[in-house]
């Protein structure tokens, strides 16, 4: 109540009364907007709906909440901490499972309204399967199926290495190939192959730590190379001239005074094949002998044995004239 008293010069007075009615504090304790940084509210936000669900993957470890007040004079807290209307809240950590986040709005008159956001963070993934598996050398037997963990691959001796490409069924799992970390869908580092079976493990570890091992056994064939790449004798030239595919040679008209010769044979595959000359072990590229020569025909036998056990015999008939 405001009173105004006016006094005239002759002393008479008049009073005016003004009644000012100030409204009570506002009672708006609602929000006009609500969003989370991770996931989507279900149902869609409505000022009168106070409970929401949000689903997030296991990889989502935190979230923020941005709430906008319907009455800017109102105040609010998010997860127990003061928050500013229209601005992201402090970062809220998320445990696996349900995380209940309260948004409490306090109207100017002190009345409160609570919105609850239930953020469900998924448990770690348990998928430790492969979606695809292949090798650069040969083909898998049997063909790839996710629940089959053992495979065989046959490759020729010429295949000295291979790579393996494995694709994860779940991108949250991890992968190693032959003990080395690998990238899903990309070829592994080159893997050397010894002759015979080579067991190569492909380990998939699910996000929850569960492992699964696929084993690819690559069997590299033994070398079948039982050839010579060179052959010479100290007593004269071969007839015909040496070629790898020709196995019979002669050296004729060797002088009577010649009593011995040496033979130098060079293996085509010295790392995998061996040879004997006249029954004795010989070294590739080194002179073997002396080999005694008699008047007449003197057969010299060079037997080459490949890694796979197959043999080839080269002969040189040295004829010493009477």
Image: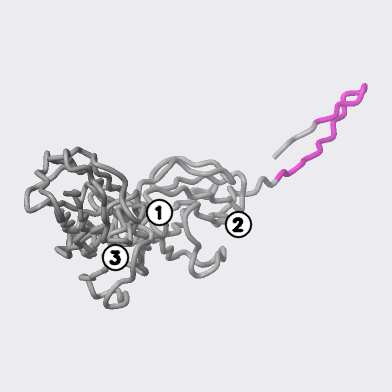
Looking at this view, is 27 or 262 the one in front? 262
Residue 184 placement (x, y as % from top left): 38, 57
Q: Measuring 30% from the left and 47% from the top, which residue is drawn there? A: 230
Q: Is residue 99 visible?
A: no
Left or right: where does residue 50 sit relative to residue 320? Answer: right
> Residue 32: which numbered mark, if any?
2
Looking at this view, is 73 or 169 the one in front? 169
Q: Tag 2 or tag 1, which sits nearer the N-term?
A: 2
Q: Is residue 110 magenta?
A: no
Q: Tag 1 or tag 3, which sits nearer the N-term?
A: 1
Q: How far apart are the alpha carbons under marks 3 and 1?
A: 64 Å
Looking at this view, is 125 or 49 the one in front? 125
Magenta-highlighted residues: 5-20
For residue 198, which quarter of the picture? Answer: bottom left
Residue 243 placement (x, y as % from top left): 35, 55
Can you identify the residue that label 1 sits on? 102
The vertical placement of 65 against 170, above or below, is above
Looking at this view, is 35 or 149 the one in front? 149
**Which residue occupies the extreme right position in the image?**
9
Mark 2, other Cα within 10 Å: few <14 / some 14–19 / many ≥20: some
**Which residue occupies the extreme left position in the image?**
280
């Amino acid at each position: 109540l405001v009173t105004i008293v006016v006094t005239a010069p002759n002393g008479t007075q008049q009073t005016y009364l003004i009644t000012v009615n100030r409204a009570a504090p506002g009672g708006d304790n609602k929000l006009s907007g609500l969003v989370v940084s991770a996931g989507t509210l279900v149902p869609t936000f409505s000022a009168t709906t106070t409970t929401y669900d949000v689903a997030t993957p296991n990889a989502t470890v935190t979230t923020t909440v941005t709430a906008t007040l319907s009455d800017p004079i109102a105040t609010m807290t998010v997860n127990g901490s003061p928050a500013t209307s229209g601005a992201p809240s402090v970062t809220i950590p998320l445990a696996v499972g349900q995380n209940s986040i309260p948004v409490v709005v306090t109207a100017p008159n002190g009345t409160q309204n609570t919105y609850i956001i239930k953020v469900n963070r998924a448990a770690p993934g348990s998928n430790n399967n492969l979606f695809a598996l292949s090798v650069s050398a040969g083909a898998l037997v049997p063909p790839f199926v996710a629940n089959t963990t053992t495979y065989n691959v046959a490759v020729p001796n010429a295949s000295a290495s291979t790579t393996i490409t494995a694709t994860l069924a779940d991108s949250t799992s991890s992968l190693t190939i032959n003990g080395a970390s690998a990238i899903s869908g990309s070829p592994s580092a080159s893997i050397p192959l010894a002759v015979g079976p080579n067991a190569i493990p492909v380990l998939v570890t699910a996000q929850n730590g569960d492992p699964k091992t696929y084993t690819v056994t690559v069997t590299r064939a033994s070398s079948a190379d039982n050839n010579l790449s060179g052959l010479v004798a100290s007593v004269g030239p071969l007839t015909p001239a040496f070629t790898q595919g020709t196995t019979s040679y002669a050296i004729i008209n060797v002088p009577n005074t010649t009593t011995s010769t040496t033979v130098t044979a060079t293996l085509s595959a010295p790392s995998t094949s061996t040879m004997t000359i006249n029954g004795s072990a010989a070294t590739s590229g080194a002179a073997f002998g002396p080999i005694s020569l008699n008047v007449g025909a003197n057969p010299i036998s060079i037997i080459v044995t490949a890694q796979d056990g197959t043999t080839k015999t080269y002969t040189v008939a040295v004829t010493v004239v009477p």
